[in-house]
Image: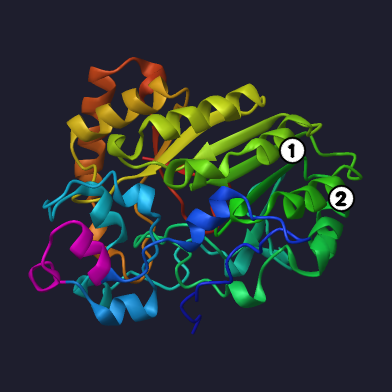
Amino acid sequence: MIPAAHPLSHPAPSQGGAAPPRWQALWREAVRDPRELLGLLGLDPDALGMSDAAAAQFPLRVPRGFVARMRHGDPADPLLRQVLPLDAEMRPMPGFSLDAVGDGAAKAGHGVIRKYRGRALLIATGSCAINCRYCFRRHFPYAAETAAAAAWREAVAAIAADPDIDEVILSGGDPWSLATPKLAELTDALKAVPQLKRLRVHTRLPVVLPERVDAALTEWLAALPWPVAVVLHANHANEFDAAVDAAMRRLREAGASLLNQAVLLRGVNDSVEALAALSERSYAAGVLPYYLHQLDRVQGAAHFEVADEQALALHRALAARLSGYLVPKLVREVAGDPGKRPL
């Protein structure tokens, strides 16, 4: 059995006595007590089905800036629903597993996953600024499987040894939870791999902790020798605010292409209105809608599932309402498939 992921250590302070970057200070100030979170929102823990057992298995973690975007006094707030541990997570459900997308079978090196031709995904770290309750890697054994171990040497060697790999995807956890010098350590090593054409970063930090997009990060990004796609993760229009807009602008100015992938979640965005608002709001921030994922069937997330029939109806209605470039592809990840499966 794969154990539930435990929170890893916070990003290390800067060396030499200098104050750490502001985003690291905000990281450490995140809300980690569900009762504190509900108290900040004026809500009663007993009335919401909050679960101490679920929080012990997969701890709550949410930046205070993200909490500030939640609606006070609203137990159905779509941002709150994404992070609050509930009793429903502890009910075993048929068809829901610890490894919903076949990560274990696709391992190709220490922290390296090979599922699709031409691409290698690096589990850069197990750390995240926010713990989303539907996370398909909530049971992943991060302590034993991170590509950053041993200064990335095994991960980079696995990529260099396969001439078919021309794109590297940084994932996790959240790769931008690593300090920028650690990221530069990886990309400096990757510069010696001649077949690489593209770098992709999957991250939620510019949405949930926009202060992470600081001068050091954008300078590193702008100096990279490959085209870079930053695939963000926002599920609801309310996740965007002025600070997020500014972070997206800084990323675009550093030369990154910005895409958004969302997960279709019951009680969060399972309406045409919510999905249309998400597409329009992300595009207004300079982020192109990319994927709308059906839920990965990981243990603990069954209460978020939306039936395929409803998902298809929502997607048809969205396509009838919005310009084509605002309509994300509706997909599911199926272990063993050569790519995302369109619905």
Residue 245 percent coordinates (x, y): 44, 28
| Residue 54, image quadrant | bottom left
- Badge 2 is on which residue? 189
**Residue at the spot x=66%, y=46% of the render?**
169
Residue 270 in view of the camera:
yes
**Residue at the spot x=13%, y=56% of the render?**
75
What coloring was used for the rendering? rainbow
At mark 1, the secondary structure is helix
- Badge 1 is on which residue? 220
At mark 2, the secondary structure is helix
Residue 313 percent coordinates (x, y): 20, 35
**Residue at the spot x=21%, y=42% of the render?**
270
Q: Nearer the viewer, residue 158 or 251?
A: 251
Residue found farthest to the bottom: 1
Residue 305 in view of the camera:
no
Q: Is residue 6 above or below residue 331?
A: below
Looking at the rendering, the stretch of residues picked out in magenta corresponds to 35-49
How many numbered discs? Answer: 2
Residue found farthest to the left: 47
